[in-house]
Image: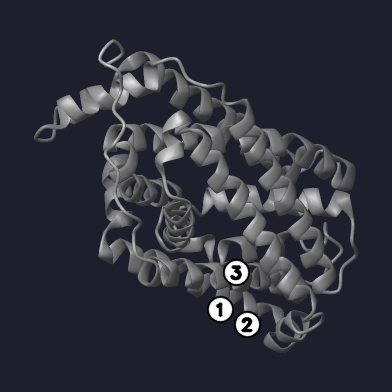
Amino acid sequence: MLKKLSAFARSRVGRVLAAAAGFGCLAFLIQHSDPQAVWAAVLHAPLMFPIVVLLQALVVGFESYAVLLLYGDARRVIPMREVWRSSMFSFAVVVIFPFGRAVGEAARAAMLSRYVGSARAAAAAAQIQAVTLIGNALISIPCAIAAYLMVGVTWLFWAVLGHFVVSAALAIGVIVAGRHSGVVAKLGKFFPGGAEWGSKVDAHLKQKQEPLTVPVLLLVLSRCVDTLQRMVLLVAVGGTFSLLKGLTSEGISLVASSAGDAIPGQVGVIEMGYSLTAEVLHLERGNAVAMGLLFHFAVLVWVGLGFLAALVLTPAKETPPQSLPESQA
């Protein structure tokens, strides 16, 4: 059932319905919060918006470098122009597609496979899923503490704590499945030529890897920048610059994004999360909705640049893919 729902969400009809649901939710929230109040909050501190956009660039940069490290020594053959091109395009895909993280990493892997081989690229795409989940789980700990200090043991505290548990469990599952189960080869049997290709991906996942410590630290660092971005957004809509509120709003965003993963860019979902917790953040409801809107406006700037980069920048000269040594294949 879940597989069918996931496939439907990625279909053209599913994407349209998901986007309509997100924008419908956003329109309802704006109308319910008083459109004039929301717009006034958006325009409250226009000088803050460029800072939010620049912080989003840091988030994308840290995450992209974490992916690059997962290629090991093979990353040295990837031209820097292609690193930037694939990173920006991948981010744009992550935002506009339902369950965008998986789709975006698949797009990045397809673009980089011409330099490192499709099996190695697919293995890195699988590993970054686990690294991202670990990073989300680790940042959830201070977010849960902040929520407790702000409002005590309430549904918000349990929601953020639940996000930690689910993210950590999924990360462990992805790592164990990749290193011990040969799951890619098993799935590949259902596709022509997939068994051979899947066994190569499994070989890359099972071979001795560089520790995930640095990629995980980069993901945690990106989430810290996320938190700083929330603190700036709070000021932008008339709130106060506060670490506790920033961590709490980051926790709200993580929970909302996970719950609304099927909706492209989580449009409307993050706004709803902030709207429901406006009192916790000491904001008027309209200001809370505006906080989510400003975040999405900043994201859209980089979505546009990501698609522009894919169109304008031509792929760098292809190099022979690096393959796994015969002893490890």
Give the amino acid at mark 3.
His
Q: Secondary structure at mark 2?
A: helix
Q: Which mark is residue 27?
A: 1
**Does residue 231 appear left or right of residue 292 in this picture?**
right
Q: Find residue 260 and report its horizontal and vertical position in percent.
A: 51, 54
In the image, 114 versus 226, the foreground residue is: 114
Q: Which residue is mark 2?
A: 31
Q: Is residue 137 left or right of residue 149?
A: left
**Quadrant containing the C terminus in the rendered view:** top left
Q: Among all residues in the image, which is located at the extreme top?
A: 327
Residue 10 appears at what percent x and percent y? Answer: 31, 56
Q: CA distance from mark 2 to mark 1?
A: 6 Å
- CA neighbours of label 2 inside 10 A, class few (<14), some (14 to 19), many (20+): some
Q: The residue tagged with tag 3: helix, strand or loop? A: helix
Q: Quadrant of residue 231?
A: bottom right
Identity of the residue drawn at 63% across and 60% down: 57
Q: Which residue is mark 3?
A: 296
Q: At label 2, which amino acid type do we have?
A: Gln
Q: Are marks 2 and 1 in contact (CB under 8 Å)?
A: yes
Callout 1 amino acid: Ala
